[in-house]
Image: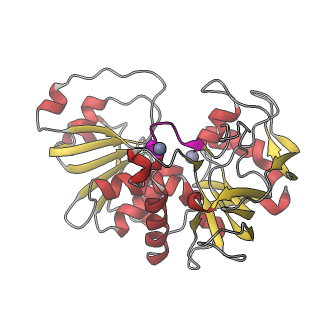
Amino acid sequence: MTTNVPAYAAPAPKAPLERTTVPRRAVGEHDVLIEIRYAGICHSDIHQARDGWGQGIYPMVPGHEIAGVVTGVGPSVTRFRVGDRVGVGCFVDSCRECAYCRQGLEQYCVRGMTGTYNALDKNGEPTYGGYSTHIVVDENYTVRIPDALPLDEAAPLLCAGITLYSPLARWQAGPGKKVAIVGLGGLGHMGVKIAHAMGAEVTVLSQTLRKEADGRKLGADHFHATSDPATFERLAGTFDLIVSTVSAPLDFGAYLGLLKTDGALVNVGAPEEPVSLNLFSLINGRRTLAGSMIGGIAETQKMLDFCAEHGLGAEVEVISADRINEAYERVLASDVRYRFVIDTATI
Ligand SMILES: [Zn+2]
Ligand SMILES: [Zn+2]
């Protein structure tokens, strides 16, 4: 039997979010019932709530940075018990059979992962995200939040944290490596913390020097303004890895010029318009231009364990649910340091 639970939803594209209730399915064989404590506000929540990518499902309850506590388990659940601290990220299911699902790369499932919200589940029912008091999720798509991480600071790790951890791990950020993070927002600030904890020499490339003090506090060794053309001359051929978190169009040729031979520029943010590129900026120096999307369940768990071990939570501003619409405007104005997190007790 489904239960209706309080939530904040966008009733229609471009309409402000408002309090409502949404159905949660009965706790199935392999499901856990989670009492949500905190839900992060990700930039993509705003895109989707406002139907920026089209084909939005309304009413839409955004939220894929979920931290909470297990309050019920299905009869066949083995990995979690009532009282466990858990998280849910960007997806709640996938086909479980394809080569990628079998490798723990569920985010690249050939049949498509099931989004935590704005998606249809296996039964064709819409999924509703974390701006809500409770959610029911299969235990195989639920991760454990270590005790060392406060739940409010842990919530943004489920999207922002894993989005940066995965490429930093894959391209081996670590001692002796020079890593640049482009953009110091919700994603970028976690990139700086994680790359620093991995042992890399970290540079922030930000539009201006406005956030330099913050960047250094977060673990950056260097900080440069990309609005200053001298930055691109001074840092030519410097980095092993650049991770770009920005969704504004970049001069990719200029950024590729900052890489060493065999260096990689990995994009986790994407401009809306296609980009053009002179391929000599790749050929010269055997450079790689790549992309990366969140991480699989096993890697997300690994990231949470890593963050707990190194004391890395997100920098958060906890808000009550009635401030979600205001928070959206502030995110769009880049007026947040560095992630809004909703206290779901206020829904
Ligand atoms: Zn996100
Ligand atoms: Zn699959």
**Residue 324: percent from the left, percent from the top?**
76, 47
**Vertical side of 225 occupied by 28: above or below:** below
Residue 108 in the magenta stretch? The answer is yes
Please say whether residue 333 is visible from this viewpoint: no
Q: Nearer the viewer, residue 326 or 22?
A: 22
Q: Give percent across and percent down for residue 213.
A: 45, 60
User: Taking 81 as reference, is 254 left or right?
Assistant: left
- Residue 120 placement (x, y as % from top left): 67, 37
Res. 238 in view: yes
**Residue 112, x across and y down, in percent:** 51, 38
Q: Main secondary structure of the magenta part?
A: loop
Pick the quarter of the image with the C terminus.
bottom right
Numbered marks: total: 0
**14 horizontally vs 187: left or right:** right
Q: Residue at x 63, y 33 (%)?
A: 47
Q: How is the image coloured?
A: secondary structure
Tell me where residue 332 sits by quadrant.
top right
Q: Residue at x 23, y 36 (%)?
A: 256
Magenta segment includes 332: no
Residue at the image position 24 percent from the left and 44 percent from the top: 264
**Vertical position of residue 6 compared to residue 149: above or below:** above
* Image position of 116 (left or right of 309): right
Magenta range is: 107-114
Q: Vertically, is 173 above or below 323?
A: below
Quadrant hosting residue 14:
top right
- Identified at 39% across, 65% down, the residue is 219
